Image (cartoon, rainbow, N blue to C red):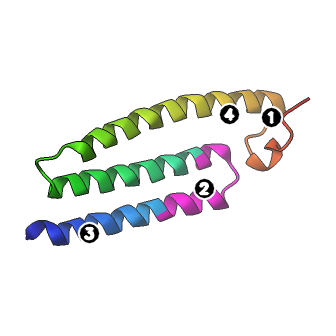
Amino acid sequence: MIFGNLLEHYTLLSGVIFSIGVIGFLVRRNVLVQLMSIELMLNSVNLALVAYNRVHAGNMNGQMFAFFIIAVAAAEVAVGLAIVLQFYRLRATINSDEADTLRQ
């Protein structure tokens, strides 16, 4: 079947993108870069879901879950950026190392 080899390539690409996102989240201390790394991880999951959905063409669950993940990612960005803006106004920095004491 032609999709078997194609599915392996998409799964490998999805794993590489997810690994880049995890490394970016763990290594960087800038909150904006961490949010972008989370977006990379969510998009890699979307790629894997759509690739698996391509193999099972009659079932549209993979694309449906991908749309839900896109909606959750949009909400995550909106809430995350609001928190980052408030944190920047409070501390004048966006490094996550300095977010240990948010009370004043």
Which of the 4 image quarters holds residue 86? top right
C-alpha separation, residue under disc 2 versus residue under disc 3: 24 Å
Q: Are marks 2 and 3 in contact (CB under 8 Å)?
A: no
Mark 4: which amino acid? Answer: Val
N-terminal of the two: label 4 or label 3?
A: 3
Which residue is identified by label 2? 25
Q: Residue at x 66, y 44 (%)?
A: 31
- What numbered label is drawn on residue 84? 4
Residue 11 at what x, y percent from top left? 31, 65
How far separated are the C-alphas under marks 1 and 2?
Answer: 21 Å
User: Residue 29 magenta-drawn?
Assistant: yes
Badge 1 or badge 2: first in the primary sequence = 2
Provide the major secondary structure of the magenta segment: helix
Please tell me which residue lies in front, 1 or 58.
58
Labelled disc at residue 92: 1
Reading the image, the residue beneath label 3 is 9
59 sits left or right of 46 in the view: left
